[in-house]
Structure formats: C-alpha cells, structure tokens
Image (cartoon, rainbow, N blue to C red):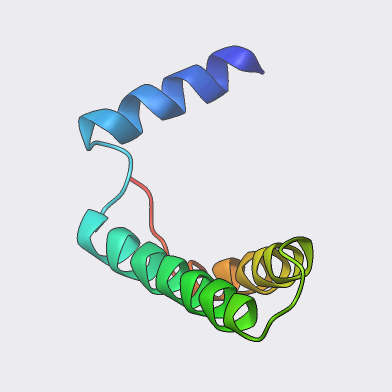
C-alpha cells in the first residue's frame, strides 16, 4: 500500500499523473480561497479561533470532492 502511494506521489510531482494539471491547480486554488475567505470572515465575526477553523475546514473539505470530481489521470 505504501508503495502505491509513493509511486503516485512520484508521478504527481514529476507531472505525469494528471492529464490536465492546470485544471487540478485551478480547482484546488478555488477550494483554498473558499476556505480562506470562510476562515477570515468567521474570525472577523469575533468568534473564538477554534470555531472558525473547525467550520472552514469542514466546509472546505466538503467542497473539495465536488470541485475535483472531474479530475482525469493518465
């Protein structure tokens, strides 16, 4: 199992795992910005820090499978 993960990681970092790496990075950036905006917005609301971190992580984690559903591998 470790070997499969290691092989996939090597292919990813060499740029040989994904058919369209630009699409992957664009969707990942959208998810990152969504999470960051949620975190900053909830932090500015005057809540304790643990609650904005928890909520933004949860919502970003729920959004990422939707954003990355069309990823194609070689």
Q: Nearer the viewer, residue 32 or 46?
A: 46
Residue at (22% x, 37% y) in the render:
15
Would you say 40 lies left or right of 74 here?
right
Q: Position of residue 18 (x, y in %)?
A: 31, 48
Would you say 49 lies left or right of 34 here?
right
Q: Quadrant of residue 38?
A: bottom right
Q: Is residue 30 above or below residue 24?
A: below
- Which quarter of the image is occupied by the C terminus? top left
Q: Position of residue 6 (x, y in %)?
A: 48, 18
Q: Is residue 52 above or below residue 2?
A: below
Q: Quadrant of residue 45?
A: bottom right
List the single residue furthest toward the front. Answer: 46
Residue at (77% x, 61% y) in the render:
50
Q: Is residue 70 above or below residue 2?
A: below
Residue at (35% x, 22% y) in the render:
10
Q: Position of residue 65 (x, y in %)?
A: 59, 67
Would you say 22 lies left or right of 53 here?
left
Would you say 10 lies left or right of 2 here?
left
Residue at (77% x, 68% y) in the render:
48
């Amino acid at each position: 199992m470790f070997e499969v993960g290691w092989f996939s990681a090597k292919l990813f970092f060499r740029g040989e795992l994904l058919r369209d790496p630009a699409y992957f990075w664009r969707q990942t950036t959208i998810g990152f910005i969504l999470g960051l905006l949620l975190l900053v917005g909830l932090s500015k609301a005057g809540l304790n820090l643990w609650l904005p971190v928890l909520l933004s992580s949860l919502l970003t984690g729920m959004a990422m499978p939707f954003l990355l559903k069309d990823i194609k591998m070689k």
